[in-house]
């Protein structure tokens, strides 16, 4: 049976109560000894107070006396940093010179951490049976800033003890609209047919066509407004250990986990990443992976074209391939950006010419074309389009496909999408 909170607080302070009693005894005895007695009593009192403030016992020993045990989480330092944002009452207990125990407690849970000055030392410490309540506290802190979050990690080879000062969590801005023949609603409706259970989806295609934006729209639609989306970019994953990735997914428990801009072409990393995907699957979590890849709308995919070593259902269940926008979609995207940037009306003849001249550009580059036309004027469109084309990846050379965006639509069942966000 867990003692009431007021009892536990009394127990933690019992050394001070004992000290007060000893001090009273010393003062009473000192009255019999004159000036020398008072001097010796003063030293005795000072020693009693020092022993109470800085006991010989370690923080670990004191926590064990209160039935706390170290959890040994790989991201324990990061979790303790999150605890400082929680609404639980915080008590700081000095333990020895320069060290202290941070203790968060209410009637449901007790959580402790050890600090040396302002540096994280160890923790979190929990009592037996408190882990479920601790995870709930952490999730309340994590998602208090909104349901669309991005996790980043410090770069380099620096050592971060249990993730302390390594991770940063920030809310994501609105993704903006998504424009394409295939709507986010279509993908969400398809995925919902599978019902409850884990699912991992790969979105592959050229850079700048809106895979990440599509993924975020799918996430919102899948959860009906209550989806918790956590985005982790490939640069962050490269700076995380395998056990840290698993721990992050366990404590965050997102509805949708978005792993953005991953490279599955390097064999030395692919097997480990796919193993991680399998481990990340939770009963009600949708994992969406985006990947840059060259795509050819004229080539009918053959067996093995979308396969990677170690890839199988249970790791990646479904793949959607995307292509550069054709002339119809380029027209839609450009007009969207015209409205956004306030470009004056463009004649049909000029618009037809601009659409033709921008063949091979993804939505991100089309947005730049519209922005330059707004700044420099419609009469300069040829120069500005040419400048943007020269800075874009060459179609047919890796990431951007083969530049045949005006060809017929790809085979049935494949996505064809572009972005305006």
Image (spheres, helix red, strand yellow):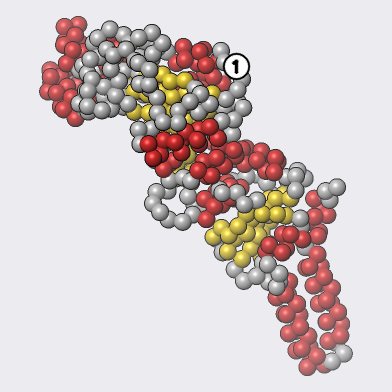
Q: Position of residue 295 (x, y in %)?
A: 30, 20
Which element carries disc 1, helix, strand or loop? loop
Residue 146, image quadrant: top right
Instruction: Tell me how many marks there are.
Output: 1
In the image, taking residue 380 as reference, residue 151 lies left or right, namely: right
Q: Position of residue 33 (x, y in %)?
A: 84, 92
Q: Closest to the observer: 343 or 69? A: 69
Residue 11, image quadrant: bottom right
In the image, taking residue 38 as reference, residue 247 lies left or right, namely: left
How dense is the environment of label 1, judged by Cα within 10 Å: few (below 14), some, or many (20 and up)?
Answer: few
Determine if residue 421 is in view. Answer: yes
Say which residue appears at 54% left-offset and 52% top-offset.
162
Q: Closest to the observer: 331 or 377? A: 331
Q: Closest to the observer: 217 or 72? A: 72
Q: Position of residue 362 (x, y in %)?
A: 28, 21
In the image, taking residue 247 as reference, residue 300 lies left or right, namely: left
Q: Is residue 127 above or below residue 369?
A: below
Say which residue appears at 58% left-offset and 60% top-offset.
121
Q: Position of residue 235 (x, y in %)?
A: 39, 40
In the image, taking residue 180 as reference, residue 354 lies left or right, namely: left
Q: Closest to the observer: 241 or 155? A: 241
Say which residue appears at 45% left-offset and 28% top-offset.
311
Which quadrant, please, contains the C terminus? top left
Q: Is residue 320 above or below residue 163?
A: above
Determine if residue 90 is in view. Answer: no
Say which residue appears at 41% left-offset and 19% top-offset.
320
Q: Which residue is mark 1?
A: 195
């Amino acid at each position: 049976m867990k003692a009431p909170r007021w009892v536990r607080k009394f127990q933690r302070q019992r050394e001070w109560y004992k000290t007060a009693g000893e001090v009273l005894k010393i003062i009473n005895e000192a009255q019999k000894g004159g000036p020398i007695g008072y001097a010796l009593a003063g030293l005795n009192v000072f020693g009693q107070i020092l022993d109470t403030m800085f006991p010989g016992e370690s923080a670990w020993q004191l926590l064990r006396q209160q039935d706390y045990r170290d959890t040994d989480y790989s991201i324990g330092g990061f979790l303790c940093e999150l605890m400082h944002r929680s609404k639980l009452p915080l008590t700081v207990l000095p333990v020895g010179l320069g060290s202290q125990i941070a203790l968060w407690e209410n009637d449901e849970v007790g959580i402790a951490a050890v600090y040396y000055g302002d540096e994280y030392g160890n923790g979190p410490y929990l009592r037996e049976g408190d882990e479920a309540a601790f995870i709930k506290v952490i999730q309340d802190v994590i998602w208090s800033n909104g349901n669309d979050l991005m996790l980043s990690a410090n770069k380099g080879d620096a050592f971060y003890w249990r993730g302390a000062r390594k991770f940063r969590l920030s809310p994501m801005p609105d993704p903006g609209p998504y424009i394409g023949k295939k709507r986010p609603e279509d993908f969400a409706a398809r995925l919902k047919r599978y019902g409850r259970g884990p699912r991992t989806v790969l979105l592959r295609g050229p850079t700048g066509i809106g895979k990440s934006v599509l993924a975020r729209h799918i996430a919102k639609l899948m959860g009906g407004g209550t989806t918790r989306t956590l985005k982790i970019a490939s640069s962050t994953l490269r700076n995380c250990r395998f056990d840290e990735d698993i721990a992050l997914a366990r404590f965050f428990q997102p509805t949708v986990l978005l792993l953005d801009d991953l490279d599955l072409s390097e064999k030395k990393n692919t097997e480990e990443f796919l193993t991680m995907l399998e481990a990340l699957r939770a009963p009600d979590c949708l994992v969406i992976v985006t990947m840059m890849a060259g795509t050819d709308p004229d080539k009918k995919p053959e067996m093995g074209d979308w396969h990677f070593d170690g890839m199988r259902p249970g790791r990646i269940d479904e793949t959607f391939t995307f292509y550069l926008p054709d002339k119809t979609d380029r027209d839609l995207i450009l007009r969207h950006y015209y409205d956004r940037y306030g470009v004056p009306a463009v004649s049909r003849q000029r618009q037809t010419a601009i659409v033709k001249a921008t063949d091979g550009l993804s939505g991100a580059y089309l947005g730049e074309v519209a922005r330059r036309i707004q700044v420099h004027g419609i009469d300069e469109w040829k120069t500005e389009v040419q400048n943007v084309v020269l800075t874009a990846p060459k179609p047919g050379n890796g990431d951007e496909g083969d530049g045949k965006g005006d060809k017929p639509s790809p085979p049935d069942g494949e996505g064809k999408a572009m972005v305006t966000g």
